[in-house]
Image (cartoon, rainbow, N blue to C red):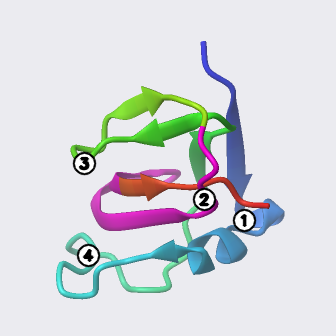
Amino acid sequence: MKEYIEYNTKQGITDLLSEIELDDEKGWVEGMHKGEMIASVKLPNNNFNYNENGELVEEYSSQKYLRVDYLASLRPVSFDFKIVAYRFLD
């Protein structure tokens, strides 16, 4: 089982969202307002990357930021999204 870091409102989800680049042309899922607070999101802790289809690929890399293309769904406590690049934060 892979280790995950869970970000929530108490841990500064706003900071996490500011590190995620969203494609404004594709926008957010219907019914979600940009900047709306979410409860939590889990991201791989380290040494992971994603391919162009958003599938998790285990590998060691020197990447340093996370970029998200679009949100796929929204639930009360979490959301799913397609990841186009995952980079470790210093």
* Callout 1 amino acid: Thr
The first of marks 2 and 1 along the sequence is 1
Q: Assess whether mark 1 and mark 2 are in contact (beta carbons under 8 angstroms).
A: yes
The first of marks 1 and 3 along the sequence is 1
Q: Assess whether mark 4 and mark 3 are in contact (beta carbons under 8 angstroms).
A: no
Q: Where does the image place residue 74, in percent across and percent down from the top left? A: 35, 58
Q: Quadrant of the C terminus?
A: bottom right
Tell me if mark 2 has few (under 14), some (14-19) or many (20+) residues whose alpha carbon lies within 10 angstroms of its own.
some
Tell me if mark 4 has few (under 14), some (14-19) or many (20+) residues whose alpha carbon lies within 10 angstroms of its own.
few
Kindly identify which numbered label has been placed on residue 9: 1
Whether residue 6 is situated above or below residue 57 in the rendered picture: below
Find the magenta span and give its range.
Answer: 61-83
Q: Which residue is the extreme one toward the top?
A: 1
Residue picked out by circle 4: 31
Residue in front for this viewpoint, 71 or 66: 66
* Callout 4 amino acid: Gly
Q: CA distance from mark 2 to mark 3?
A: 27 Å
Residue in front for this viewpoint, 52 or 78: 52
Residue shown at 66% from the left, 53% from the top = 88
The first of marks 3 and 4 along the sequence is 4
Whether residue 48 is situated above or below residue 65 in the rendered picture: above
**82 magenta-colored:** yes
Residue shown at 71% from the left, 60% from the top = 89
Q: Secondary structure at mark 1?
A: helix
Q: CA distance from mark 1 to mark 3?
A: 29 Å
Residue picked out by circle 3: 52
Q: Assess whether mark 2 and mark 4 are in contact (beta carbons under 8 angstroms).
A: no
